[in-house]
Image (cartoon, rainbow, N blue to C red):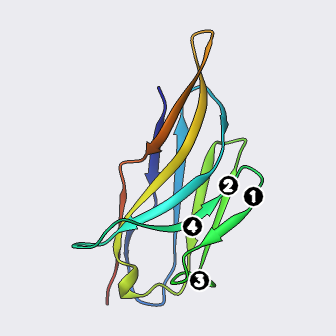
Amino acid sequence: QVQLVESGGGLVQPGGSLRLSCAASGRIFSIYAMDWYRQAPGKQRELVAAITSGNSTNYADSVKGRFTISRDNAKNTVYLQMNSLKPEDTAVYYCHADQIRYYSGSYLRIDYNCWGQGTQVTVSS
């Protein structure tokens, strides 16, 4: 079994920056698309940014030009650089992977729709 573990959240003033990381643990063989979602209190979870294994990216309109998603396939890690943060960016941020292939013993297995535990980002003065 694999796990996605996020880090890097915290409290930041408006206009500040944070960098989130999400590392997949386990004997990973490959990960296709990796995404960042967020959920603010009382709101639905929304897609923030996505990146494929070939580094094609997609962003929500609300974060274009401010957030950058990237990945390090050798480290099985995806990042979200968040600049010019606004109070409305306050939310719990979740890492997601559609499909993770990994070794369990000598078997190659696949986990689908994998989520991290979430990391809180608060933008406030």
Above or below residue 2? Residue 92 is below
Numbered disc in front, either 2 or 1: 1
Q: Amino acid at mark 2?
A: Arg
What residue is shown at x 67% (from left), y 61% (from top)? 70
Numbered disc in front, either 3 or 1: 1
Q: Which residue is mark 2?
A: 71
Q: Which residue is mark 1?
A: 55
Above or below residue 102? Residue 113 is below
Q: Amino acid at mark 4?
A: Ala
Instruction: Mark 2 and mark 1 in contact? Answer it, CB < 8 Å.
Output: yes
Numbered disc in front, either 3 or 4: 4
What residue is shown at x 23% (from left), y 72% (from top)? 41
Instruction: Mark 2 and mark 3 in contact? Answer it, CB < 8 Å.
Output: no
Q: Position of residue 64 (x, y in %)?
A: 60, 82
Residue at the farthest top position: 106
Which structural element holds mark 4?
strand
**Nearest the eye: 86 or 109:** 109
Local crowd size for mark 3, using a 10 Å CA cut-off: few (<14), some (14–19), many (≥20): few
Going from N to C along the chain, the mark reached first, 3 or 4, is: 4
Q: Which residue is mark 3?
A: 66
Local crowd size for mark 1, using a 10 Å CA cut-off: few (<14), some (14–19), many (≥20): some
Going from N to C along the chain, the mark reached first, 4 or 1, is: 4
Q: Amino acid at mark 1?
A: Asn
- How far apart marks 3 and 4 lie (CA) works out to 11 Å
Q: Position of residue 12 (x, y in %)?
A: 39, 79
Q: Which residue is mark 4?
A: 49
Which structural element holds mark 3?
loop
Q: Amino acid at mark 3?
A: Arg
